[in-house]
Image (cartoon, rainbow, N blue to C red):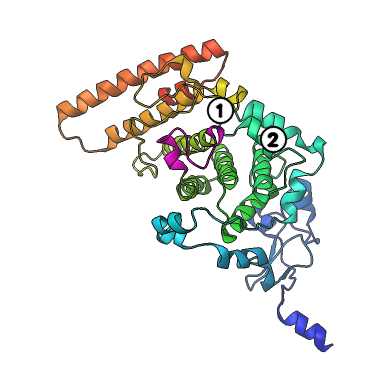
Amino acid sequence: MQAMSAENEGRVIIPRMRPSCSQCQRSKKRCDREKPRCSACVRYGRECIYTSTVGTVETDQAPITLAPSQSPSKAAQENEDSFPVVFFLDSVLFQRSLSRLPELELSLGDPLLNYIGHNASDRAFVGKYFTTIHPAIPFLSKRGFKERVLNPLAPQRPANTLLVASMKLLATPLEDEGPRCGAYYAIKNSLLEAEHSCVLELRILQAIILVAVYEIGHSIYPAAYLTVGYCIRYGAALGIHRAVEQYSEETFSITESEERRRSWWTILVLDRFISLGSADRAFLTPDPSSSSLLPIDDTIWEENGETDAPVRRLFEPPTTSMGRFSLTAQAAVLLGRVFRSIHDFPVSEDFWQNDVKVLDNTLVALTNVSLEEGRFRGIAVCSPSTICYR
């Protein structure tokens, strides 16, 4: 008895009440108060939550107990002591002494693991992702993904698992519960666990990017706006913003550098796009320099591995040989300049008029090239021209 009492001291048992569920209260419908779910919630396929008068919450999961040991995870607590804080406090000292971050452990919950499945038949969504989502935001290396993530002989890394789950979330049709589904919250919770575990990896960033795309597509605000900001900070911590300034980085292959570069351009596009309805808010990513490297041609990116491709820079005039994603990146930069032209106080009227004329001519040229590129490659909806017409 004493042992049982000691064990229960660290747990909080939430009492069960008998009011109507919150869904029926909100809709002012009759509730039969059945447990774990009332008949109305079962019929409409919604989550059934009972709230007591003292502010405790009872859901359809029974029994509900809160264990203090469950948050944060043991791995997260151990990683706190392993992460070198000098990485943020003094980057120069970090490069001289450690030069690279340690590989830290990340624990993923059962809801996320059950969501992605383990059989080959459960991976049909991967092909759907690369045929529907990937052409618009081709920041993942398809070849690298198959060799390093889907390869059964490759080590199973939690960061890869989280990326796969985010891909499935985007590529799978929504169920009756809507966009704020259990899988969405499982991925968000896993990203929070990765943050608590002090894990900084490119695959985690790419998972965050896909979650941001999902939230924007389903108008999940303010989460979408905040997630884009999270992408920017996380990417800056990884240093991928430097990939747009140099073709090959010392510790990365050509393909890896291109993937990092494309990830940063995707973040910049999202940052500009998320501000379409609120251009008075400042962009979180600065405009790249005129010598910044653009993504290589998408066809070369998809078909070749370490093959060198023609280097294109932002100051070069747009051509169809640049590829759709490169043109999309240029359109996003122009979109930012249009916003500034509208909202910034001009130095003089003549200066403003000249700036507007230059922007208009550039947008027209980019639109024509984008339309030609779309006809040449058989693309029905071309993202660069869509941004230009905005």
Left or right of 218 on screen, residue 290 = left
Amino acid type indicated by mark 1? Ala
Q: Secondary structure at mark 1?
A: loop
Circle 2 sits on which residue?
Answer: 147
The residue wearing badge 1 is 136
| Mark carried by residue 221 | none
- Residue bounds of the magenta highlight: 240-256
Height in image: 33 above or below 380?
Answer: below
Q: CA distance from mark 1 to mark 2?
A: 22 Å
- What residue is drawn where x is 35% and y is 44%? 282
Q: Residue at x 48, y 63 (%)?
A: 85
Element on which disc 2 rests: helix
- In this view, the residue in front, 223 or 230, is 230
- State yes or no: residue 244 in magenta: yes
Quadrant that contains the N terminus: bottom right
**Residue at coordinates 60% horizontally, 32% vertically from top-left?**
141
Name the spot of residue 225 as percent of width and height, x first.
Answer: 48, 46
Q: Residues within 10 Å of mark 2 (few under 14, many from 20)?
A: few
Identify residue type, mark 2: Glu
Residue 367 sits in which quadrant?
Answer: top left
Residue 171 seen: no
Location of residue 362 in the rendering, given as x and y in whole percent from the top left corner: 33, 20
Task: Where is residue 243? Give x, y as percent.
Answer: 45, 38
In this rendered view, identify the residue nearer to me: 294 or 332: 294
Q: Nearer the viewer, residue 108 or 379?
A: 108
User: Which image quadrant for residue 18?
Assistant: bottom right
